Image: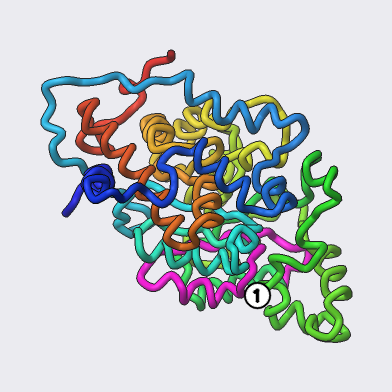
Amino acid sequence: MPAFGDYQNEIYFNGLRGVRPKLPVDFKSLEAKARAALPQSVISYVQGGCGDEHTQDLNVAAFQRWGLVPRMMVDASQRDLSIDLFGVRLPTPLFMSPIGVISLCAQDGQGDIATARAAGVTGVPMVASTLSGAPLEHVAKALGGGTGFFQLYTPKDPALAESLVRRAEAAGFKAIVVTLDTWLTGWRPRDLNDSNFPQLRGYALANYFSDPHFRASLKMPPEEDPAAAIMQWAGIFGKTLTWADLPWLRSLTKLPLILKGICHPDDARRALDGGADAIYCSNHGGRQANGGLAAIDMLPGVVKAAGDAPVLFDSGVRSGTDAIKALAMGARAVGIGRPYAYGLALDGTDGIVHVLRCMLAEADLLMAVDGYPKLADLGPSALMRA
């Protein structure tokens, strides 16, 4: 089986024929090109964070405080980046984090579908957002043989929550990811300065407008009175979840239940004791709270508290090197967000595939050069504080 790092050989040999990569292979250049390609309102929404964006920036900078310790005289000619997650063998430890406006990042407005197709091509799972430009059934079909998880923004209407979960189960999604920190939106100056909240303009609401329970709550179908449907959505979007709701959440599905947004060890323990199957350590990339803490710095405590339960992680991951550091800190799988959104903006499904291949190649080559042939060889002892 070809190594992920062989992607660099493909690029170099193409260069002998005068062919350069269609898209940049590094995040900064990719972001710059995407900024020029996307409308201002979309790029602000994707790039922006909460408050003065200190936490968002710290999420990225914190990775630089850690370095992988090289180990020599190790046969790392073959690397294994595969992982086991919920009884499924996945070829890589990466996954694509949920992005509620991923549809708008595509030139044709079908970003959810393009992302699903990229998951099928690469084997990198997609976490499909409730906020989608296409019904979840269409997204699941586009996965082909790929793996998808469904991310739930829990509505105030319990019956609607149950309907969305049942649909996700029927469509073939492999887990339910409940986001805990977005029952309302944080203070996001870039969006506020643009007076732009895409959902209030009717974007990314396909899962609601296609849901039989939601449609039954309307006097007229969304196709006939979209404004009323949008206001109905706005009124039921975010349920304030407490620990008292965990038994109910657990009862909604037999699929693995993952709680997203947990950063405190006590919360991790309580979630697992209450029936969650996995923890998703994330501070929403700094979009929801400008608290001044980097998610990667909170990961080790969550991993320790979780014991044998898998811990997923995202926030601030911009490269394959970042992903390897998070894995060394104990994450079972690592999510990326903005990088694949920018790849999508520039070249659709092919752009996402390129970004994923770049990140996997960097991660694979780092493990090779530093003498870590398997993910199991990574651990806290592989890292040193810079």
Q: Residue furthest front?
A: 18
The answer to whether 189 appears left or right of 267 in the picture is right
Residue 28 vs 312, above or below: the answer is: above
Q: Residue furthest top?
A: 386
Q: What percent of the width, then of the height, locates residue 200?
A: 82, 62
Which image quarter holds the N terminus? bottom left
Q: Quadrant of residue 298?
A: top right
Residue 177 vs 29, above or below: the answer is: below
Q: Residue at x 62, y 67 (%)?
A: 109
Instruction: Name the foreground residue: 105 vs 142.
Output: 105
The answer to whether 110 appears left or right of 320 in the picture is right
Magenta highlight range: 131-159
The answer to whether 310 appears left or right of 12 in the picture is right
What type is the residue that disc 1 sits on? Ser
Q: Is residue 141 magenta?
A: yes
Q: Quadrant of residue 231?
A: bottom right
Residue 249 seen in the current view: no
Q: What percent of the width, then of the height, locates residue 142?
A: 46, 73
Q: What percent of the width, then of the height, locates residue 229?
A: 83, 75
Q: Secondary structure at mark 1?
A: helix
Q: Residue at x 83, y 86 (%)?
A: 224
Residue that mark 1 sits on? 163
Q: Residue at x 76, y 57 (%)?
A: 239
The answer to whether 379 appears left or right of 136 in the picture is left
